[in-house]
Amino acid sequence: MFSLQPHVRYRCTHCGNLTRFDVEVVRRTREYHHYDLGGEVTVEEVETLEEKRERVVCRWCGTSEHVEEVASPW
């Protein structure tokens, strides 16, 4: 499982990629929907109740088994 920390980056130890990943995330949210008189909806607020990153896949070589988290230098 992968961390939800904001200052974490990913690295593929198979090909060396540090920049391109497909990240699969499952989120459970609460949304405030505002409907106008014509029936059009605008989502005005979104609150994330739960979030889990399930899989990170390297865009260069297609592996998920060799992707690791590394601390961001920023």
Image: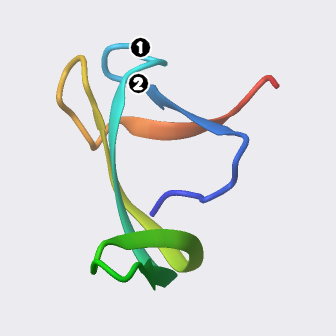
Residue at disc 2, secondary structure: loop
How far across and down, in percent of the image, does residue 9 sit?
Answer: 59, 34
Q: Is residue 29 visible in this depiction of the protein?
A: no
Residue 53 in which image quadrant:
bottom left
What amino acid does circle 2 point to? Thr
What amino acid does circle 1 point to? Gly
* Residue at 43 percent of width and 69 percent of height: 42
Disc on res. 13: 2
Disc on res. 66: none
Q: Is 64 displayed left or right of 62 in the figure?
A: right
60 above or below 34?
Answer: above
Q: Quadrant of the N terminus?
A: bottom left
According to the picture, the residue beneath numbered tag 1 turns out to be: 16
How far across and down, in percent of the image, does residue 65 sit?
Answer: 28, 43
How far across and down, in percent of the image, does residue 11 sit?
Answer: 48, 27
* Residue at 69 percent of width and 54 percent of height: 5
User: Does the CB distance between marks 2 and 1 fall below 8 Å?
Assistant: yes
Near-viewer residue (50 or 60): 50
* Residue at 27 percent of width and 42 percent of height: 64
How far across and down, in percent of the image, does residue 16 sit?
Answer: 41, 13
Near-viewer residue (2 or 36): 36
